[in-house]
Image: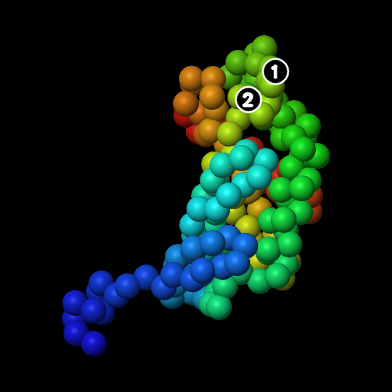
Amino acid sequence: MGLFDFFFKKPVVINDELFGQLRFVDTRDKAMNFFEGYTFFKPSNGNIEIHVEGNLPGPDEEQKQFYLDLQEDYDKYIPQIQTAIETEFRHWEKDFTIKHFRQEFTPVFLEIPRFNQERSIWSISFDTTNGKGHEIVVYFHDGKIDEVVIDG
């Protein structure tokens, strides 16, 4: 292996049967390794960027089942996501109200953790379609919202 190969080695790309093509990001700390890519997200009828924590050979069955369940149960999460976003937005806009969640918020990023940890937190990020350019990240722990972060 030459110096060029050392610094510019080709990324490892896997083809997962559920997620499709994923690039493996290998860090010095194996606990921080992850896969990234884009995959079809049924609730939005479009692609979503994903980040799946893990090591080779690829995402585990629990992570895959989580993704399948999230797609099926997505509508069940909307009321608590909507309430949490409205509460957070009202720090800046007193009368902020979401009228049509699916029309006003587009899921753009999903982070799936390793579920064998003491505290496994997953997150989903949304872009707003209201023209204000906000990106919202909603963090979940044990099926409940842990934190909402609004950027922009």
Task: Return the residue found at the far left.
Answer: 3
- Find residue 21 and report its horizontal and vertical position in percent: 49, 63
Label drawn at residue 24: none
Q: Where, by quadrant of the figure, is residue 58 drawn?
A: bottom right
- Find residue 9 and report its horizontal and vertical position in percent: 29, 75
Residue type indicated by callout 1: Lys
Q: Where, by quadrant of the figure, is residue 28 drawn?
A: bottom left
The residue to which callout 2 is attached is 103
Q: Residue at point 48% right, 20% down?
A: 131
Q: Residue at point 26% right, 79% down?
A: 6
* Circles 1 and 2: CB atoms closer than 8 Å: yes
Q: Residue at point 63% right, 58% down?
A: 112
Look at the image and tell me in which quarter the N terminus lies: bottom left
Q: Nearer the viewer, mark 1 or mark 2?
A: 2
The residue to which callout 1 is attached is 99
Q: Is residue 144 visible?
A: no
Is 1 drawn above or below residue 22 in the view shown?
A: below
Disc 1 from disc 2: Cα separation:
9 Å
